[in-house]
Image (tube, grey):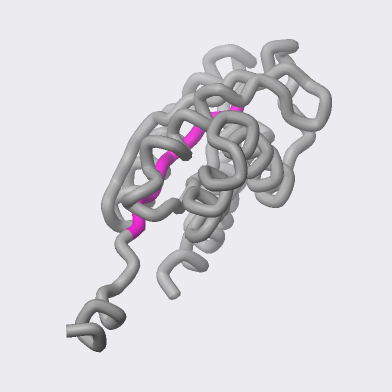
Amino acid sequence: ACVADSMVRQKNRYLTVQVQSLKGNGPCLSDRAIFANLLQSLQQLYGEKGLGNGGVALQVKGYEGKYTGLCVVRTSRSSLREVWAAITMTTKMNGETVACRVLHSAGCVRTCKVAAVSILNSGFDLFSQAQGRSLPQAERESLESNFSAALAGFEM
């Protein structure tokens, strides 16, 4: 019975997250900076135990800060609620006031990628409307390709 229990695979959840600056200009962030801020938020909310439980499978990939502020966060299924709360409660990153929203939750990276790319395209359309000019198709495809490539790291 002990051998079978140790062979159970880790079940993950994938959250599509939007990080928006409240000052209007996009925050100067990276996957690594968002990850560090999430760990800090987990520790503030849940202490060392929450950090240990929530930080085990935590990973951030694909941050696109120029137009949409989207990234994908991977966490274990057992710590989904804690990580979601930590994301929502995060108000400062790199000294800048931000708002973080979970836009989609998925059980596999494939469905998360589909939702994230759809949200990414909506963000491009909103950017185009706000700027009064269309985002060049080549740049749009390049950003979408880079985002998908970054998420491929989760599939290992």
Can you say whether 43 is above or below 145 in the image?
Answer: above
What residue appears at the point 24 percent right and 84 percent down from the top-left corner?
A: 2
Please state the total of marks drawn on the protein image: 0
Towards the viewer: 91 or 140: 91
Relative placement, left or right, of 97 versus 20 is right
Measured from the top left, where is residue 4 in percent x and y? Answer: 20, 84
Say whether residue 71 is visible: yes
Where residue 15 appears, x then y in whole percent?
A: 41, 42
The vertical placement of 27 against 2, above or below, is above
Of residues 15 and 51, the one drawn nearer to the viewer in this rendering: 51
62 and 120: which is toward the camera = 62
Which percent across, then down, holds residue 62?
A: 57, 51
Q: Main secondary structure of the magenta part?
A: strand
Q: Is residue 125 in the magenta section?
A: no
Q: Position of residue 139 (x, y in %)?
A: 61, 45
Residue drawn where x is 63% and y is 15% of the image? 131
Q: Report the quarter where the C terminus lies.
A: bottom left
Q: Which segment is the magenta one?
A: 12-19
**Relative height, residue 90 to residue 80 (above, below):** above
Relative to 78, does residue 94 appear above or below in the rendering? above
Q: Name the residue located 64 percent from the left edge and 47 percent from the top edge.
A: 35
